[in-house]
Image (spheres, rainbow, N blue to C red):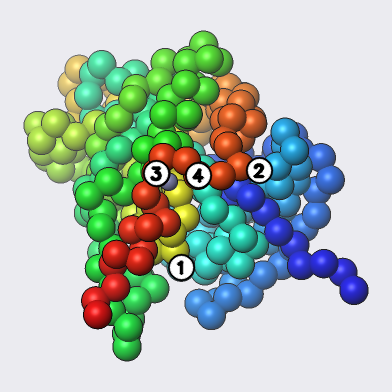
Amino acid sequence: MKSKPQADIGIFSGSGMYEFAADQIETVKINTPYGPPGDLIEIGTIGGKRVAFLPRHGRKHSIPPHKINYRANLWAMKELGVSRIISPCACGSLQKDIKPGEFVVTDQFVDRTKGREDTFCDGPEVMHISAAEPYCPELRKLATAAIRAEGAVGHNGGTIVVINGPRFSSKAESKWFTQMGWHTVNMTQYPEVVLAQELGICIVNIAMITDYDAGLAGDVPEVTTKEVVRMFQSSVGILHKILIRLIKEIPAERKTCRCLQKVDEAYFC
Ligand SMILES: [Zn+2]
């Protein structure tokens, strides 16, 4: 009998990241209680670890951010036995000192989405997961080190504002985010991060800056989809190197984080 596919690390690959160098690739189709994930999942070996790749927008980039089945994507990773997720994404910068081509290892989010299914806990069991520290501190440290070791600029910590999309922000919205001191803006980190937390999976975001958001307009050129894609494509090579380095550095066992224990502490009983 064929053994059930397993993986150690999951990657939600973002826009334009569908090619990845890995050995022993198998393609698996998974269904979940929440429906199918965004696409088939490819599992390959990197540095002795089994790594599952799921393009969150689908390989043809046909699923917009507000239509992604986040619960199915996370549940599929859990089914494969994944205990750590690396979640790179394209981001706009809200601060002038965070420049296109640089990376931010996010430590906080602000949720500005609406209508997204953002929990696995619809009763009868009730849980309230702590989102005080939503991204795994152990993985954040490793991710920052991996970015810098590849010679790129890696900001250690930053707040990501997650907008619903698919439109970009107005200048007024963006200015507000900037004035609040938040750092980056994106459309997919929420509810991905909290769903991972509910499942006890460590998650780290590597935000790749593709542009300055609209609130900085006047000082910098206004964001366009074409420019985002162009910048992403020019930086995706370095992102792959960072990911491979990070995958190799992640220890087999979780050592210092409380991502798993937080689930036990979340149940209302
Ligand atoms: Zn963790």
**On screen, 246 above or below 85?**
above
Element carrying mark 2: loop
Mark 1 to mark 3 CA distance (whole Å): 23 Å
Element carrying mark 1: helix
Mark 2 to mark 3 CA distance (whole Å): 30 Å
Q: Position of residue 186 (x, y in %)?
A: 34, 43
Check whether the beta carbons of the residues at disc 1 and disc 3 lie within 8 A of each other. no
Mark 1 to mark 4 CA distance (whole Å): 24 Å
Check whether the beta carbons of the residues at disc 3 and disc 4 lie within 8 A of each other. yes
Circle nearer the N terminus (1, 2): 2
Circle nearer the N terminus (2, 3): 2
**Residue under pointer 1:** 71
Callout 4 amino acid: Arg
Q: In this rendering, would 230 be left or right of 210?
A: right
Q: Residue at x 37, y 38 (%)?
A: 137
* Residue 93 vs residue 28, the one in the foreground: 28
Q: Is residue 228 visible?
A: no
Query: Which labelled disc corresponds to residue 18?
Result: 2
**Residue under pointer 3:** 257
The answer as to whether callout 4 falls within 8 Å of ligand 1 is: yes
Q: Residue furthest right?
A: 1
**Residue under pointer 4:** 254
Q: Residue at x 66, y 43 (%)?
A: 18
